[in-house]
Image: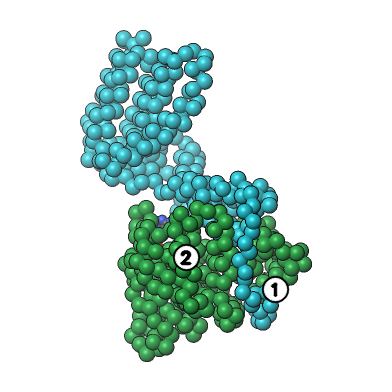
Amino acid sequence: MDPKPRTELPAWLIEKSTSTKRQAARTSFLQRNQRHLRALLTRLAQPAPVIAKRRWHLAPQINLIRLLLLVFLIALINNVTLLWCLAILLGFQLLLLSPSQLRRFVKSWFVSSLVALIFVLPSYWLTGPSTLLFFGLKTSLMLANAQYYRLTTPFQDLLSGLKALHCPDVLIMTCAIAITYLRMLGQHLLLTMEALELRTVAPAKHPYRLIGAMFGNLYLKSYSYALELYAAMEARGFNGHYVRTTTPHNRWRDYLSLSPDILVLILFIFWGN
Amino acid sequence: MVLIKLANLCYDYPNTRGLDHLSLTIDAGEFVCLMGPNGSGKSTLLRILSGLASPKSGEYQLHGQAVTAAYLTDAQQRQQLHQKIGMVFQNTDVQLFNTSVAEEVAFGPRQLGLSASAIEQRVNDCLQLTACEDLRDRVPYQLSGGEKKRVALASVLALNPEILLLDEPLNGLTIAAQRQMLTLLQRLQAAGKTIIMASHNFQQVQTVGQRFIIFNRLHQLDADMSQADLQRQPERQAQLMTL
Ligand SMILES: Nc1ncnc2c1ncn2[C@@H]1O[C@H](COP(=O)(O)OP(=O)(O)OP(=O)(O)O)[C@@H](O)[C@H]1O
Ligand SMILES: [Mg+2]
């Protein structure tokens, strides 16, 4: 039984609210940047792009092995010619992407390379420009391969790839939850910020206390969300084991797709350095 | 007096349409119900009206002032807009971010530079109006769905906005609580507030809504009629009943 609320309105609610014109107060850092922060969160909360089925569907583990092999090779190889080979190899793969995918690739590659450059930059003072250039190139080549993988592989394939490589279920689950889940949390934070924004009618006096409360809330929320998510997964028959769905694929194609990388590996072993 | 004017308003989400060429005007003091099937654009319209999203094309005027993306970049103008417009989200979960219900309601008035006693007064009044007095010291995120809805309304009322945007405010409420909330909304309207409420349950709102704006699946305006007009169209009523 709901308690009977009072029904007559108080006087302050009846009078027309005068929109208080405040002197141009110092707007806080939070307020000035709220829009940017929101824009950033919007981007983070964007769902991953839907990946079109590729013409040649490779086994998921092969894709994963290729990525690992490439990263491994790029990290080890110090021979410029061999690195060139790998770059050209990637270039050929990029040619097969659709224009919109290519645009997305270039954008995310550029951004991630810039971020990485910040970390590589100190080597300029330690060892000089040539090392910086070399390491910068290597890093961005690695990132390019990773971005290519990310753009062309559905999330489900990453999971089945990990499973096929006998990763423990716990690891796969952590990965799966973290990826789907961070987006959800980002979305949640975004909406909370919007709600906050809507009720902000004056520059906040203690913005940092507010931020604290908001993140505290987010933490509590994320904890109960995680429990609920797991319960929901269990309710739908999840028993802690990821099942591999086997899709028919051509083994020869799989090996063929690995062959250029293996060729570079062989070259590296015999002529590298 | 024309309060809100929309002209040829379009809104797109990254990969879907949100609203398609919407034109309408809303007068001050109206009680408007937005109706339509799931995904027809009700929440999207409320987001635009509240200034959270800017239309892709077309115009939105409030009190004759165009509310554009450029207008909204100015923090002070934005704050003035938020003082005029209060919104209860469809997902009330995200709306409550303070550590207690009383704090939640006091959040708005505290920024208005009111005295401590005036703030206390507003908090008490709002909690009483929404029948939330006994939740006063609870933590918002632990409340039930219906309780959250009521606290969210209380926290919005505390700012005394002249326009109330309500996104499915009756969902999750018991019949008794629905009736109480509708009575409160009617009183607010009588006090001169403009109320714009999204709903897909015609039964809940048919007696209180004075104007019905109906969207179709294509995110377009399907019909815009007064309650009296709607009374005369039984087939339209039947359609709304089965939304
Ligand atoms: N954040 C978003 N990103 C992408 N598309 C969205 C987003 N929010 C809504 N949409 C899409 O925009 C359209 C309109 O959605 P909206 O939320 O306005 O519908 P609604 O009328 O409020 O529906 P409901 O009755 O279910 O609340 C839908 O097709 C929806 O899928
Ligand atoms: Mg909605």
Of A33 and A27, nearer the camera is: A27
Q: Which residue extends farthest bottom?
A: B232
For image coordinates 30% across by 24% down, the residue present is A87
For the colour cyan, the matching chain is A
Of B208 and B115, nearer the camera is: B115
For mark 2, name the chain.
B
Of A40 and B3, nearer the camera is: B3
**Numbered badge on residue B65:** 2
Q: Position of residue B17 (x, y in %)?
A: 34, 60
Tags 1 and 2 on a common chain: yes
For mark 1, name the chain.
B
For image coordinates 39% across by 81% down, the residue present is B225
**Mark 1 highlights which residue?**
B125
Q: Amino acid at mark 2?
A: Gln
Query: In what element is the residue under mark 1?
Result: helix
Dot 1 beta carbon under 8 Å from ligand 2: no
Q: Colour of chain B?
A: green
Quadrant, the N terminus of chain A: bottom right
Quadrant, the C terminus of chain A: top left
Which quadrant would residue B223 be assigned to in this image? bottom left
Q: Please determine whether, in this image, residue B177 is positioned above or below residue A63.
A: below
| Badge 1: residue crowd in 10 Å (few <14, some 14–19, many ≥20) | many
Which quadrant would residue B25 be assigned to in this image? bottom left
* Numbered disc in front, either 1 or 2: 2
In this image, A47 relative to A59: left or right? right
- On the question of residue B96 being in view, the answer is no
* Measured Cα–Cα span from mark 1 to mark 2: 32 Å
| Badge 2: residue crowd in 10 Å (few <14, some 14–19, many ≥20) | few
For image coordinates 45% across by 55% down, the residue present is B69
Q: Position of residue A149 (x, y in %)?
A: 35, 35
